Amino acid sequence: MPSPIPPGHSPEAMPALDEADEPARVPLKIEDWLTVLVMGALALITFANVLARYFTSQSFAWTEEFSVFLMIVLALVGSSAAAARDRHIRIEYFSESGSMARRKALARFGAVMVALLFTLIGVLSIRLVWDDYRYNETSPGIGIPQWWYSIWLPILSLGMALRAVGLFIRRGRKS
């Protein structure tokens, strides 16, 4: 069985499983369960569509539209989990080198940037939702109100911003 430690890393550099999730005020299991539910829904929808096409040579019209929506939700929920766990992509040469004060400052700076970005996306996307609602936009595939899909962008973006703020606070407390 191959070693779970990537080549070039020492066992001391790998986080232990019990310290992978820091205590947070809002449980991190929320994103985990949302990810499981969305992935399960995607698998079921895709499987149902494959079966329908195999047996009837027709596909469900709604599956592609709903699958795209679920993939966007999955990306936002996964990004929220990554922000809460401080697992976003970074250049480790800069983020893991230098003094502890420098690392802490860089971690807090990254959290602030993520919070600002997703607050901006959340606030600006509220206008998108309002326009979808006001102009009675409908989805192209099945004709349901478009705001049923777009309402989740500001909600999940602001949730991700709050996770980044929580990370900023937790990184400030660490000594």
Image (spheres, rainbow, N blue to C red):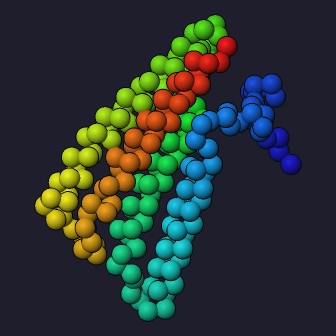
Residue 69 drawn at (x, y percent): 39, 61
Q: Is residue 46 left or right of residue 100?
A: left
* Residue furthest bottom as drawn: 56
Q: Residue at x 49, y 91 (%)?
A: 55
Q: Is residue 135 toward the left or the right of residue 104 in the image?
A: left
Residue at 52%, 68% in the rendered image: 41
Judged from this view, the residue extending furthest toward the front is: 25
- Residue 35 image position (x, y, % from top left): 56, 55
Picture residue at 33% right of the left edge, 41% below the top: 122
- Tell me if residue 102 comes above or below residue 113 in the rendering: above
Which quadrant of the view contains residue 140?
A: bottom left
Looking at the image, which residue sits at the far left? 135
Q: Note whether residue 148 is visible.
A: yes
Residue 130 image position (x, y, % from top left): 20, 53
- Judge from the rendering whether residue 166 lies leftward or rightward of residue 130; answer left or right: right
Q: Is residue 97 above or below residue 139?
A: above
Q: Which residue is drawn at the image coordinates 52% and 47% (left, top)?
A: 78
The quadrant the C terminus occupies is top right
Near-viewer residue (148 or 2): 148
Q: Position of residue 96 (x, y in %)?
A: 62, 18
Q: Is residue 89 visible?
A: no
Q: Is residue 136 above or below residue 62?
A: above
Circle count: 0
Q: Would residue 73 be found to the left or right of residue 144 on screen?
A: right
